[in-house]
C-alpha cells in the first residue's frame, strides 16, 4: 500500500514543449497537497519547466490495468505512462559514486521507460552508459546494471516505491530516457 506522499509523486512534465498541460504559476497548492507535491512544484518552477502536472492517485492505482491508469491521469495514451528506475552498476560495488565520478564512470543512472514498451534491454543500457563514460568506459564485462532495492531507491531518490520521478531526486545522477518517448505525439 502506498502512502499519500508516494501517490503525490506521479508526474508528467515537458520542458520547452508546445503542449501545455498545467501552467506552473505561483498559485497556492490545493489544501490536500502533500509535502512531496509541494517540493516537486517548487523544483519544477526552479527548473523553468513550461508545463507539469502532479496528481495524487488512488491507493489501488497499480492494481488496475494501464488503460484505467491512463484515464485517471488524463494521459493521451498508455504509451505516455512511464516508470523511473534507479539502476546501479554492481561491478562498482566497492566504489562510492563520488569515486566512480572521479574516474569518469557512473555508478548509478535513472532510467525512464514506458510501461507498455519493450522490456529494459540491459545490453543496450550498458552500451548507453559506456557511451556516456566515453574514453573512461571500461570493458563490457565491467558492467552489471541492476535495479536498486526499494530501500536504496528511497534513500537515493527521496521518493517512495512506485513514486520515483527524475525531477527533484535527492541524489543527482544521469537521466536516461527511452528513445521511444521522443516519438510520442503531444496531447
Image (cartoon, helix red, strand yellow):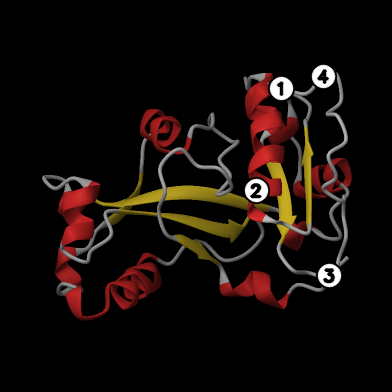
Mark 1 and mark 4 in contact (Cβ < 8 Å)?
A: yes
Q: CA distance from mark 3 to mark 2?
A: 23 Å
Secondary structure category for the residue under label 4: loop
- Relative image position of residue 170 (x, y in whole percent): 45, 38
Q: Nearer the viewer, residue 150 or 170?
A: 170
Q: Residue 186: give its label.
A: 3
Which mark lies nearer to you, 3 or 2? 2
Q: Nearer the viewer, residue 67 or 92?
A: 92
User: Residue at left 28%, top 59%?
Assistant: 106
Q: CA distance from mark 2 to mark 4?
A: 22 Å
Q: CA distance from mark 3 to mark 4?
A: 29 Å
Which mark lies nearer to you, 3 or 4? 4
* Mark positioned earlier in the residue sequence (3 or 1): 1
| Residue, disc 2 | 46
Q: Residue 183: give its label.
A: none
Secondary structure category for the residue under label 3: loop
- Relative image position of residue 109 (x, y in whole percent): 39, 56
Secondary structure category for the residue under label 2: helix
Q: Quadrant of residue 162?
A: top right
Q: Residue 32: give its label.
A: 4
| Residue, disc 1 | 34
Amino acid at each position: 500500500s502506498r502512502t499519500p506522499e508516494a501517490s503525490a509523486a506521479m508526474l508528467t512534465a515537458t520542458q520547452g514543449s508546445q503542449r501545455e498541460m498545467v501552467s506552473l504559476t505561483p498559485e497556492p497548492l490545493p489544501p490536500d497537497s502533500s509535502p512531496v507535491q509541494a517540493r516537486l512544484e517548487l523544483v519544477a518552477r526552479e527548473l523553468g519547466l513550461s508545463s507539469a502536472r502532479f496528481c495524487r492517485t488512488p491507493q489501488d492505482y497499480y492494481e488496475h490495468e494501464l488503460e484505467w491508469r491512463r484515464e485517471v491521469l488524463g494521459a493521451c495514451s498508455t504509451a505516455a505512462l512511464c516508470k523511473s528506475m534507479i539502476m546501479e552498476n554492481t561491478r562498482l560495488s566497492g566504489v562510492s559514486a563520488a569515486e566512480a565520478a572521479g574516474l569518469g564512470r557512473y555508478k548509478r543512472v535513472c532510467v525512464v521507460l514506458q510501461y507498455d514498451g519493450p522490456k529494459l534491454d540491459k545490453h543496450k543500457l550498458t552500451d548507453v552508459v559506456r557511451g556516456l563514460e566515453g574514453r573512461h568506459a571500461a570493458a563490457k564485462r565491467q558492467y552489471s546494471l541492476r535495479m536498486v532495492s526499494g530501500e536504496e531507491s528511497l534513500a537515493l531518490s527521496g521518493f517512495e516505491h512506485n513514486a520515483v520521478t527524475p525531477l527533484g531526486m535527492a541524489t543527482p545522477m544521469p537521466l536516461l530516457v527511452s528513445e521511444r518517448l521522443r516519438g510520442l505525439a503531444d496531447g
